[in-house]
Image (cartoon, rainbow, N blue to C red):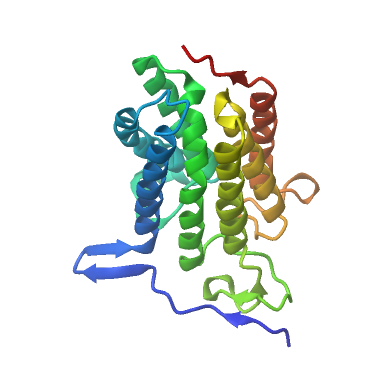
């Protein structure tokens, strides 16, 4: 019999009073947004200081809308378009789970484009800082996925395998924790080091590109251990939807790095 760690008894609902419930999933989003915003303010206060702290305070509302609307619509369109076509009212039931990072990213990018045009700011001056803070939200989001017993890994016999009650009796890779480590901790440290100890902040587009490359590589790797969505299964050559969606990100990230422009200080 394979060794496995039983799933810790964590209720997805932290507090429930009548119809009102506070879920870990919602707290993860709140923690990611608040801490990410504070980190953005820290970076904005450092040279080259193109985007002010006050402007970031205004942008946070745009970012929240981009994450929630883009994340939900991305999941609807990328993963379950037919299901939601016949059940459109379920689209607004975000509390039941079902958010796409790729969709959320597109939503935030659209929000950044509109915001920087309105404020007449260089797009990458804002995007580079947001990219540095995004791993914070990814870290908390993946922990919430673990608590919700969603996006778990493939069956395995590694010593740290976990039996997820929602995933049947087989021990599985805790792929949510792999993603929290790679997309959250490792990517945050890499971007922090580049922003703090190199001239990356002075070359607009570099940090955004590094984030896209780092995230896409992390996602492609973790998808090798993650159970594919049941309604999609494996695609061409045993690949997954997450890997296919990450390839354009990787290519765009490389373009951003190669075409980065140095800040011209007046």
Which residue is most to the bottom?
Answer: 1
Residue at figure coordinates x 46%, y 65% from the top left: 148
**Is residue 132 shown left or right of residue 24?**
right
Which residue is most to the left?
Answer: 18
**Is residue 77 shown left or right of residue 206?**
left
The location of residue 206, given as percent across then percent down, is 61, 29
The location of residue 216, given as percent across then percent down, is 65, 42
Query: Which of 90/10 is in front?
Result: 10
**Is residue 219 shown left or right of residue 126?**
right
Visible residue check, residue 184: yes
Residue at figure coordinates x 54%, y 18% from the top left: 263
Q: Is residue 210 above or below residue 150?
A: above
Q: Is residue 58 above or below residue 184?
A: above
Q: Residue 226 occupies which quadrant of the picture?
A: bottom right
Which residue is most to the top?
Answer: 266
Q: Is residue 191 above or below residue 51?
A: below
Visible residue check, residue 81: no
Query: Which of 131/163 is in front?
Result: 131
Viewport quadrant of the N terminus:
bottom right
Tell how many labels.
Answer: 0
Query: Which of 121/194 is in front?
Result: 194
Residue at figure coordinates x 45%, y 79% from the top left: 9
Residue at figure coordinates x 38%, y 46% from the top left: 33
Query: Which of 28/69 is in front?
Result: 28
Q: Residue 176 occupies which quadrant of the picture?
A: bottom right
The location of residue 103, given as percent across then percent down, is 50, 38
The location of residue 256, given as percent across then percent down, is 64, 25
């Amino acid at each position: 019999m394979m060794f496995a760690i039983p799933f810790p008894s964590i209720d997805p609902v932290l507090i429930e009073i009548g119809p009102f419930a506070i879920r870990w999933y919602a707290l993860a989003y709140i923690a990611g947004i608040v801490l990410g915003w504070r980190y953005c303010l820290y970076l904005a206060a450092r040279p080259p200081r193109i985007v002010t702290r006050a402007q970031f305070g205004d942008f946070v509302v745009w970012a929240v809308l981009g994450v929630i609307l883009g994340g939900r619509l991305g999941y609807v369109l990328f993963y379950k378009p037919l299901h939601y076509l016949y059940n459109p009212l379920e689209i607004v039931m975000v509390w039941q789970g079902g958010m796409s990072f790729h969709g959320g990213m597109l939503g935030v990018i659209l929000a950044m484009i509109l915001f920087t045009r309105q404020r007449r700011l260089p797009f990458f001056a804002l995007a580079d800082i947001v990219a540095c803070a995004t791993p914070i939200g990814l870290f908390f989001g993946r922990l919430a996925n673990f608590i919700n017993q969603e996006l778990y890994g493939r069956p395995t016999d590694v010593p740290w395998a976990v039996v997820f009650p929602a995933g049947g009796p087989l021990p599985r890779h805790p792929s949510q924790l792999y993603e929290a480590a790679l997309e959250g901790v490792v990517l945050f440290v890499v971007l922090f080091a580049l922003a703090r100890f190199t001239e990356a902040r002075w070359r607009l587009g570099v940090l955004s590109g590094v984030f896209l490359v780092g995230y896409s590589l992390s996602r492609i790797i973790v998808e090798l251990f993650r159970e594919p969505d049941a309604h999609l299964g494996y695609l061409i050559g045993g690949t997954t939807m997450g890997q296919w969606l990450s390839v354009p990100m990787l290519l765009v990230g490389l373009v951003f790095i190669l075409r980065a422009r140095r800040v011209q200080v007046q």
